[in-house]
Image (cartoon, helix red, strand yellow):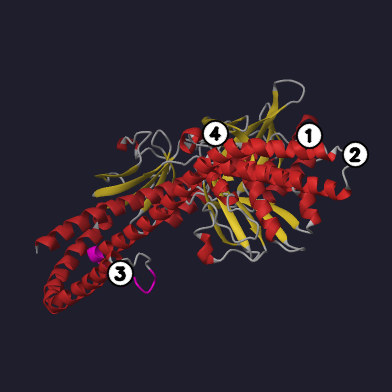
Amino acid sequence: MVLAGLAFLTAQDAMQSEIEHGLAAQAEAISSNINRIMFERLQNAATWSTLEVMQDMQVQDVDKRLSNFLAKLNSGYGGVYSNLKVLDRHRLIVSSSDPAEIGKVAAAAPAWQTLNLAGANLTLDAPVNISASGVAGQSRLTIRAPINSPFNSDPLGELALDFNWEQINALLDNAASDLRMVALVDSEGKIVAASRTLRTAGLLNGRALAGWQLTADARGAIVRSGAPVWASAVVVGIGRPVNFAGFNGAGLSTLVIQPESEALSPVRRIALISIAMLGGIVLLTFGVANKVSALLARPITALTALTKNYKLGQKSLTAQALPDLAEGELGELELAFIQMVQDIDLAQRDLVRASKLAMVGEMASIIIHEVRTPLGIIKSSAQMLKRESALSAEGMELTGFIESETERLNRLVSSMLDSARPRGLNPGPTDLHGLLHQSGILLGSQLEKAQIEISEEFDAVDPIIDCDAEQITQVLLNLIMNALQILPPGGKILLTTYQVRDHHDGAPSDSIFIAVSDNGPGIAPLDRERIFDAFFCRRDGGIGLGLAIVQQIILAHHGRIEVSQSKLGGACFTIQLPKRAIDLNEKSK
């Protein structure tokens, strides 16, 4: 009973919070939709007022070209505007989508709001009710934009767009229901648009809600007295317009109003459901009590056996060795133990890799000190021997072998040194697409000679990142050379970039992905875990240090590299790099 009571109180609070959140979310969505519509209408006014055809008003639109243009615009927007017209300085209608309006003097109306959009100062008249074709109850919002002269700073007149404000009322009607009302209010509390219930009550264009004293930054939901909208208390969801293309709205707020008794009726139903659940729980508890012990014992036994096997040396957790995960805390315990074993295995592999690299460092130090000097002497001696005129052709060939082999040994010890002691990073803004393209050009002759086709698919929106361009170039050349060495004539290499977009706002993430793919034989799944280990190599004549160096450089950039099967059927090396440098030199240490 205590648990049921606590569950009810928790559910009641959660339900009430969710209801209030739902009203606020609906208000935000409606407000954002209205903001988008208002932005489009204002953008139309700002854009159309600058068109060259508007200059025809200087000659009073004698050929009716401007009027025809306005008529086509109005027809193309299918009822969005009730009329489009151009007024001169004396408010005389020079051109109009409605020919009957031409020559009339437009009535002056006080400005409701003044906005600046796209460099144009726009004026909004307050929405007013009109009567068109004998049908009463329609309303419009007039948007006025100045038409500037190309010769001086004085405006020639203005473009007036009569926006059909009934579209906003219809939008609020769609969001409302029998007991849910929606109102659009300005900064002074005036109701400029409303759903049908509020319009029928005669509250439209009035300041009935000014007494609610909603602050300019009010958001979320509130519970307050419903007068004059409703006789009892109401829950009010408050929505403010979200920035749309730099436009923050016209100071309008959306209110979604619902009687508190109706809004919170689900909470009362929860009370009845909780009482029914209490009786069911009592009966169910006795029914399953005998089975609980067996359900608990089976996963504990399996976990105990797994622990013993691991203790006895079975450290590789195969799919057959893993028990079925239980639910609840036992399942979490099993999962935590399995994750711990996998982390230990990974740490052991990292330790082995670090040990190998440390060994390489020691070996490289000795080799550089002991081998480079005699290698240089041997190479110099071979070069001097080649200058001997009496040297036979066979001798020339042998000295060439000596020179080339000493150069190969010199590259080998240099590679071992680079893998053990990578250079410090020198990050700077770098065009990643440029690096990829340049890498393909650098290896162009070798690719052409091997009859390998290389192609590019760059989908990253912003390829500029902070990185060490020289070392990233070394990574790209290494990966392309690996594909080049394994591919037969006619093979393909694909260089791609892309960015993952944020789930909420759709903006590109702070990381950029590079993929180097080929249609070669690929890499066996069992070899993918060891492919970046030092001295691991499946290719004849390979050393096994290239990919280890590649991984070190990527890790130093605070990135990561993975290998998988490409869509071409071969191997795909995927690199993820942060766009901004994050203490790269400190990280590389």
Give the magenta part as a residue range.
Answer: 318-330
Q: Are marks 2 and 3 in contact (CB under 8 Å)?
A: no
| Closer to the camera in the image, 107 or 371 | 371
Position of residue 452 in the picture relative to residue 462 (left or right) = right
- N-terminal of the pair, mark 1 or mark 3, is 1
User: How far apart in space, not on screen, are marks 3 and 4 (Cα)?
Assistant: 46 Å
Mark carried by residue 424: 4
Judging by the rendered image, the residue that carries numbered circle 2 is 389
User: How far apart in space, not on screen, are marks 2 and 1 (Cα)?
Assistant: 92 Å
Asked which quadrant contains residue 384, the reply is top right
Position of residue 262 in the picture relative to residue 363 (left or right) = left
Q: Residues within 10 Å of mark 2 (few under 14, many from 20)?
A: few
- N-terminal of the pair, mark 2 or mark 4, is 2
Q: Quadrant of the N terminus?
A: bottom left
Q: What kind of residue is marked 4?
A: Gly
Position of residue 146 in the picture relative to residue 391 (left or right) = left
Q: Are marks 1 and 3 in contact (CB under 8 Å)?
A: no
Q: Position of residue 532 (x, y in %)?
A: 53, 53
Most distant residue in the left direction? 1
- N-terminal of the pair, mark 4 or mark 1, is 1
Judging by the rendered image, the residue that carries numbered circle 3 is 325
Q: Main secondary structure of the magenta part?
A: loop
